[in-house]
Amino acid sequence: MTTVKCISPIDGSVYAERETLSTEAAQDAVARARRAQKAWAARPLQERVDLVMAALKEIENSTDRMTEELAHQMGRPVRYGGEFGGLQERTSHMAKIAADALAPKVIEDSAAFSRKIMREPHGVVFVVAPWNYPYMTANNTIAPALIAGNSVILKHASQTILVGEHLADAYRAAGVPEDVFQNVVLSHDTTSALIADNAFDFVNFTGSVGGGQAMERAAAGTFTGVATELGGKDPAYVRADANLDTAVDGVMDGAMFNAGQCCCGIERIYVHESLYDAFVEKAVAWVNNLNLGNPLDQATTLGPMANVRFANEVRAQIDEAVAAGAKAHIEKMDADDGGAYLTPQVLTDVTHEMRVMRDESFGPVVGIMPVKDDEEAIALMNDSQFGLTAAIFTADAEAAEAIGQRLETGTVFMNRADYLDPALCWTGCKQTGRGAGLSELGYHALTRPKSYHLKKA
């Protein structure tokens, strides 16, 4: 066994420490999940929905725990109140659409034949969740997987190890059987061994490209479904007809909220040359109004990055860009300690030769480039190995849709960014991975089709 530690970005102290399960204990957890799944799937759908919603209520009753633990684990300022709003929106929507999304598709119901397609739960679903939005990203899969009749095993990121425990506490208090939803602490080796041994019927992974590749390698030859949401380098395009103030506020919030640690955060900005100078001036002023500091302080609007090594990667990208000719617009802030507390940065004179415009930063830095027209913007937006979301700021919805049809991305936004609509499919392309989360397609991903062709006597 090994020990997993959560190092708090607030002060570098060990905030939580847990031992990983032995291989035997992990195998036993999977066996218990598999035994419990059949009885769980046999329960009426509405009963499963009600239990998931009861778990949501348990979390609502403990939002103070959520908010404080998030600040200590990954640095989100307490002023934002945790993640319950988004958690409620997504879970409630999936509960609302469950009956329709999981309903049989009847092809024929006549005196001669009954033909239909039913949805069957996979069995045991393995969720590997990230630290940046640790409640919402985990429950995006947990809630619909349970509602669909699967049992779930959750492995949470070491940075947010207590989130898995909080979720397990809530589901247990709501009445979901302990073996139906389990939170486990596993080493990478044990995780890979379980997947390779065909322990799970479906794997949902959110994390790095390297992590997703490891999941797929482990599952090779097992025919286990693997859904992935991996890296991102999401662009925003501000057209000549955009409302400048709306664009600055929307784009910069998308780039800086949560210290830039958002899967669909804005990491590169393309502005029509007619608005470019004004946009940069307003963007710099917007960032200079942020208050970098201790996330436990109500006045803090920008907390530390979740880990010093994440901040060091962002600093390296900024330093490399400046050395190659980029201009940094934000002076070092008082709270910047050279560690997890990192001054947010706006860069101009950037090019796609620089890592800060090419590699995932996952931090509070963004590069801004002028473009002469839609064609140049589209070419630059598509010049990326990733494809999760893209945001277009414009007064012309038809133009936004036409541009969106040419973008290599999973979601197209207009006049907003960094938002996940639970009624729409959350998906990506290229090295962002493959998957279908939330919406009715989320239910389809968490179940398998089963066809009935019944010839009546």
Image (cartoon, grey):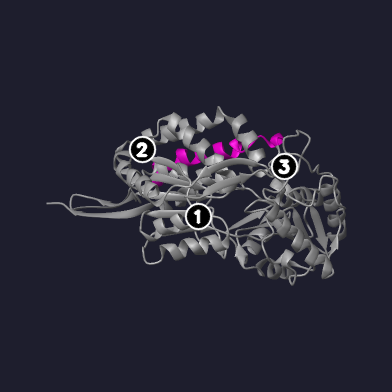
* Distance between mark 3 and mark 2 Cα atoms: 46 Å
323, 9: nearer the viewer:
9
- The residue that disc 3 covers is 11
Q: Assess whether mark 2 and mark 3 are in contact (beta carbons under 8 angstroms).
A: no
Residue located beneath label 1 in the image: 205
Which residue is farthest top? Answer: 61
Residue picked out by circle 2: 45
Report the residue at 32% width, 36% height from top. Answer: 44
Q: Position of residue 190 (x, y in %)?
A: 44, 55
Q: From the image, state whether disc 1 or disc 3 is nearer to you.
A: 3
Near mark 3 (Cα within 10 A), the count class, few <14, some 14-19 or many ≥20, is some
**Amino acid beneath label 1:** Phe
Disc on the earlier residue, 3 or 2: 3
Task: Residue 370: tell me if it is visible.
Answer: no
Q: Secondary structure at mark 1?
A: strand
| Residue 396 image point, x, y percent | 71, 56
Q: What's the residue at 50%, 33% (across, down)?
A: 56
Q: Nearer the viewer, mark 1 or mark 2?
A: 1
Majority SS type along the magenta span:
helix
Nearer-the-camera pick, 33 or 4: 4
Q: CA distance from mark 1 to mark 2?
A: 26 Å
Left or right: 192, with 419 as reference point: left
Q: Secondary structure at mark 3?
A: loop
